[in-house]
Image (spheres, helix red, strand yellow):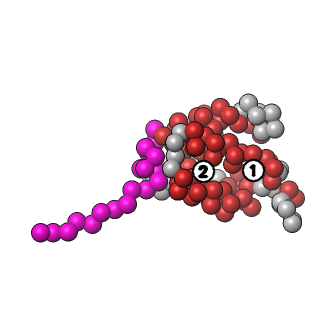
Amino acid sequence: MTVTEQTTPSYYERIGGAASVKAAVDLFYDRVLVDPELAGYFADVDMVGQRRHLALMLTVVLGGPNEYAGRGLAEAHQPLGITEAHYQRVGGHLVAVLTQLGVPVDVLDHVGVVLAQVRDQVVAAGHRPGV
């Protein structure tokens, strides 16, 4: 008898892979683009490309294949002057969408940890608490 090694499925696999990530990204931007406090950030943005970038990044965050080749978070976001309040609002929309789609709590917790880890790369230096 041989023992086979079982691998634990990634968060990406557990939530349903690419189709689920795409659904989450679409619902997320449907919410963000009608949020009057956030919509202005996307006024001159190619939303097809933006959705693709977020899907690739979210795939990586969830342990899926890394096919992201875009700019780093700081490079893409620092020039936008994003405030802490707006960052929290965007994170709230993302968590709400993932919750709506039935994403398990441990995966939501992981997303929350990642959002906290990358906060300083996204929120403009002058808009961070204590900076």
Examine the rendering and report whether any part of residue 126 can be seen.
yes
Which element is circle 1 on?
helix
Relative depth, front residue between 92 and 90: 92
Q: Mark 1, mark 2: which one is toward the viewer? A: 1
Q: Is residue 105 left or right of residue 39?
A: left
Magenta-colored span: 1-19
> Which residue corresponds to the image point at 75% horizontal and 50% vertical from the top-left?
87
Q: Residue at x 54, y 53 (%)?
A: 105
Please state which amino acid type lies under the numbered disc 2.
Gly
Residue named by callout 2: 70
Residue 37 rendering spot, x and y as whole percentages: 81, 38
Q: Is residue 45 visible?
A: no
Q: CA distance from mark 1 to mark 2?
A: 23 Å
Residue 28 vs 127, above or below: the answer is above
Where residue 73 appears, as percent x and y from the top left, is: 67, 55
Identify which residue, 60 or 28, lies in the foreground: 28
The x and y percentages for residue 100 are: 57, 38
Q: Is residue 63 magenta?
A: no
In the image, 92 versus 53, the foreground residue is 92
* Residue labelled with disc 1: 88
| Residue 131 point in image, percent of width and height | 87, 65
At label 1, which amino acid type do we have?
A: Gln
